[in-house]
Structure formats: structure tokens, C-alpha cells
Image (tube, helix red, strand yellow):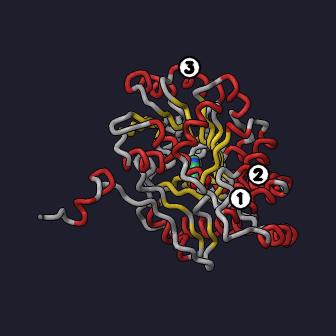
């Protein structure tokens, strides 16, 4: 019997995808590309962790649902533990949400440009991804969103707020308007919420279609891969059925409990990044040929007169790694820089100033806002 060729075994939807790209670790570079927190653990916290990790029983499976970690989170967020599902990063919860709600052809919607995993996961599962362009300065285009929601009737709407990679936010009023017309779930992704100082959590009680995604990755604990979802407990109980058992390993669960109990460390670091963000934006705005976009996150999107690919390489040669997002539709010549420590930000701005001075003769005119 003739057997299919190896690649014929892979779904066409998957063959068409491009894998998510993460940079190889390069300790020689100033790493401002992945929206991580720049602050390592203090010696005191490392010490506290060592003690706890020593006690992890690696010959046993982890706590299947992460009850201990869920109870710490539930107390801090003031929600019922039954409303919470833990994920191996919030990426995994995006996949879980779509797996539990949507099948081939199901419409799923998000404003674009946005976090690439919504579309990648949707497409891999054969869903229909509908991207609704943000406005000229990447502000929400509410009329377009509402019109497209009414026309396509998506099962799930993803709203990242602050949005990655643009940094902008949806106001509470805008989210309510979307909730009022959406026939399906409205997933508010608050991965960067702490940097914006806002959350939709208090509205979960009276909005049963609202689902909130959160992550510990952007506030100092990216290596642990801990994300969580908060939803109406009835919905959470259904989603729970497709969560893989033991998805979050014992070390991450134990470490997250310890570190969340030191939330003053997390909060102080967030405040420091917010202070630095304002500094970096005003210094970028002072550079000729640079256009920044408003950011409530721990990164800043900017466009320059110098071609973005070229600028990205020049920064890299000077030891500074940012994210080149220029190939994303609508983001030509845009780079995204994560807010680092003061010293890292100084190095980045110094390298950028130098790179812009060098120029290449290929400068464009930066579009200015109207
Ligand atoms: C908007 C948004 N949501 C979710 C994630 C996923 O984060 P994690 O899987 O690390 O929790 C990211 C990561 O970049 C993001 O930008």
C-alpha cells in the first residue's frame, strides 16, 4: 500500500504557518527584545527560593490543578479559586480557549497588529482569523471593530490591553461596548496590565462572557512560564476539561507561590519600569526622525526615518538587541524596544542616537499624526 509523503501528514494549515521566532540567548547583548523585566531576583529572594525548591518532590507528579498557587492568586486577585486556570504561560491558555470553544472555520477576531499567537493558534486549528486594523496611530477603531463583530459573529474576540507590539490600551468604555455586541467570548489579555495600572477583573462578576488572561512573564518571572486565566466559574469548569493534566511543573508552582508572596518586590520593579518608560519616551521624542507611539506597557514602539531593518542591524552591532517588527503589516520601519534598567536604556539611546547620525542616505519622511 502506498503511504503518504512525510509532509503530506502535516495539516495544510500548519504547513502555511511561520513558526514564532525567539532570539537565541546572547549574554553579550543588552536584551530589550522580549518584554521581560530587566530585574533579576535579589539574593534574599534567591535564598527564599532555594529553601522551597529543595522540598519539591520530583519523583511525584505536580499538584494537578495547582491548588496552592491558585489559592494564593485567588486571594490576591479576590476571585474564587474555581474561576482560575493555570497555564504554562498564557500562550497555552490561548490555545486552551480556542480548543474548547472553536472548530474548523469558526470565526475568531482581534484588532491588528497584535500578539501573533492569537492568529497562529487559530490558523493551526483551522479557525477563521479576522484581523481588524487599528487606527492610524494604532488607537482602537471601535466602529470598525463593532461592524466586523456584527458581520462575522466571532466566537472569541481577543483584546490585548496594553496591546503588543503597539503599547496602546482599550478603555473600559470601549471594552464594555465590545462586550455589549459580541456574540461570543471577549478575552481581555492583560499580560502587560500591571504596567498600565488597570484591570477588568472587578467586572467579571457581572460580565459572564468576559475572560481575563494574565501572565507572570512580563513582571519578572518569564522563566517560570506561569500564566493564568480568570473566567466565570461555570465556563472555567468546562475549559478545565481540555487543560492537559499536570501542565505546570512543580518547580514553577512552588517558585511562583514564594515570589507572589513577595509582591512588594514585583510592584517596586513595575513602578521603576513605568518611571523609566516615561524617560525613554521623552528622550526618543527629542530625537529628530523618531516617531513614538503611546505606550502603557513595558515596551515602546517607534518608527524612524532610517529603514528599520538597517537600524536594527546597526543597533545589534553596537550590542543592543531590540525587536524588529517591520515585517508585520502596518509596521514598516518600526522597532519595539523593551524598557530596561536605567543603564540599559541609556546604552540603547546612545546606540540609537549614533545609528541615526550615521544614516544611510535612505531616510524616509516620518508620517506625522494628524
Ligand atoms: C499580549 C500577550 N499575551 C500573552 C503573551 C504570552 O505570554 P506568556 O506565554 O509568557 O505568559 C504575550 C507574550 O509576549 C503577549 O505579548
Q: Earlier in the sequence, mark 3 or mark 1?
A: 3
Marks 3 and 1 sit apart, C-alpha to C-alpha, by: 36 Å
Mark 1 residue crowding within 10 angstroms, few (<14) / some (14–19) / many (20+):
many
Q: Name the image quarter holding residue 236.
A: top right
Residue 105 horizontal side relative to residue 369, left or right: left
Mark 3 residue crowding within 10 angstroms, few (<14) / some (14–19) / many (20+):
few
Residue at image location 46% in from the left, 43% down from the top? 99
Q: Nearer the viewer, residue 249 or 268?
A: 249
Q: Earlier in the sequence, mark 1 or mark 2?
A: 2
Q: Position of residue 173 (x, y in %)?
A: 64, 24
* Mark 1 C-beta to ligand 1 under 8 Å: no
Q: Position of residue 179 (x, y in %)?
A: 56, 24
Q: Position of residue 192 (x, y in %)?
A: 66, 47
Number of numbered labels in the structure image:
3
Q: Secondary structure at mark 1?
A: helix
Q: Position of residue 11 (x, y in %)?
A: 29, 53
Q: Is residue 236 above or below residue 121?
A: above
Instruction: Kindly check if marks 3 and 1 are in contact, taking CB atoms under 8 A apart as contact.
Output: no
Marks 3 and 2 sit apart, C-alpha to C-alpha, by: 35 Å
Residue at image location 79% in from the left, 69% down from the top? 55
Q: Nearer the viewer, residue 39 or 242?
A: 242
Q: Nearer the viewer, residue 57 or 141?
A: 57
Q: Which residue is mark 2?
A: 68
Using the image, tell me which numbered label, if any, was put on residue 253.
1
Residue 59 horizontal side relative to residue 254, left or right: left
Instruction: Kindly check if marks 1 and 2 are in contact, taking CB atoms under 8 A apart as contact.
Output: yes
Residue 129 horizontal side relative to residue 158, left or right: left
Residue at image location 41% in from the left, 38% down from the top? 131
Q: Is residue 186 visible?
A: yes
Q: Which residue is mark 3?
A: 180
Amino acid at each position: 500500500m502506498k503511504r503518504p509523503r512525510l509532509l503530506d501528514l502535516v495539516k495544510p494549515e500548519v504547513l502555511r504557518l511561520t513558526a514564532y521566532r525567539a532570539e537565541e540567548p546572547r549574554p553579550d547583548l543588552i536584551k530589550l527584545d522580549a518584554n521581560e523585566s530587566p530585574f533579576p531576583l535579589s539574593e534574599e529572594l534567591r535564598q527564599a527560593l532555594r529553601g522551597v525548591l529543595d522540598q519539591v518532590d520530583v519523583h511525584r507528579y505536580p499538584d494537578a490543578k495547582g491548588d496552592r498557587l491558585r489559592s494564593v492568586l485567588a486571594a490576591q486577585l479576590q476571585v474564587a479559586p474555581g474561576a482560575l486556570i493555570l497555564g504554562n504561560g498564557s500562550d497555552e491558555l490561548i490555545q486552551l480557549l480556542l480548543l474548547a470553544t472553536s472548530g474548523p472555520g469558526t470565526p475568531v477576531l482581534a484588532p491588528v497588529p497584535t500578539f501573533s499567537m492569537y492568529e497562529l493558534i487559530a490558523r493551526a486549528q483551522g479557525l477563521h482569523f479576522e484581523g481588524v486594523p487599528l487606527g492610524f496611530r494604532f488607537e482602537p477603531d471601535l466602529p470598525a471593530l463593532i461592524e466586523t463583530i456584527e458581520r462575522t459573529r466571532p466566537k472569541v474576540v481577543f483584546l490585548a490591553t496594553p496591546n503588543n507590539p503597539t503599547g496602546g490600551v482599550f478603555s473600559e468604555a470601549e471594552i464594555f461596548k465590545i462586550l455589549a455586541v459580541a456574540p461570543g467570548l471577549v478575552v481581555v489579555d492583560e499580560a502587560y496590565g500591571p504596567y498600565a495600572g488597570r484591570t477588568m477583573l472587578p467586572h467579571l462578576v457581572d460580565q459572564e462572557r468576559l475572560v481575563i488572561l494574565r501572565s507572570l512573564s512580563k513582571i519578572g518571572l518569564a522563566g517560570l512560564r506561569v500564566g493564568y486565566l480568570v473566567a466565570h466559574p461555570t465556563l472555567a469548569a468546562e475549559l478545565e476539561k481540555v487543560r492537559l493534566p499536570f501542565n505546570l511543573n512543580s518547580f514553577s508552582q512552588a517558585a511562583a507561590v514564594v515570589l507572589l508572596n513577595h509582591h512588594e518586590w514585583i510592584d517596586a520593579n513595575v513602578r521603576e519600569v513605568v518611571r523609566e518608560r516615561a524617560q525613554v519616551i521623552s528622550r526618543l521624542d527629542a530625537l529628530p526622525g523618531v516617531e513614538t507611539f503611546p505606550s502603557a506597557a513595558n515596551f515602546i514602539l517607534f518608527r524612524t526615518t532610517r529603514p528599520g531593518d538597517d537600524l536594527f542591524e546597526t543597533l545589534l552591532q553596537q550590542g543592543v538587541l531590540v525587536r524588529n517588527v517591520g515585517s508585520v503589516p502596518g509596521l514598516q520601519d518600526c522597532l519595539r524596544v523593551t524598557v530596561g534598567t536605567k543603564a540599559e536604556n541609556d546604552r540603547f539611546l546612545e546606540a540609537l542616537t549614533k545609528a541615526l547620525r550615521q544614516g544611510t542616505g535612505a531616510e524616509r519622511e516620518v508620517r506625522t499624526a494628524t
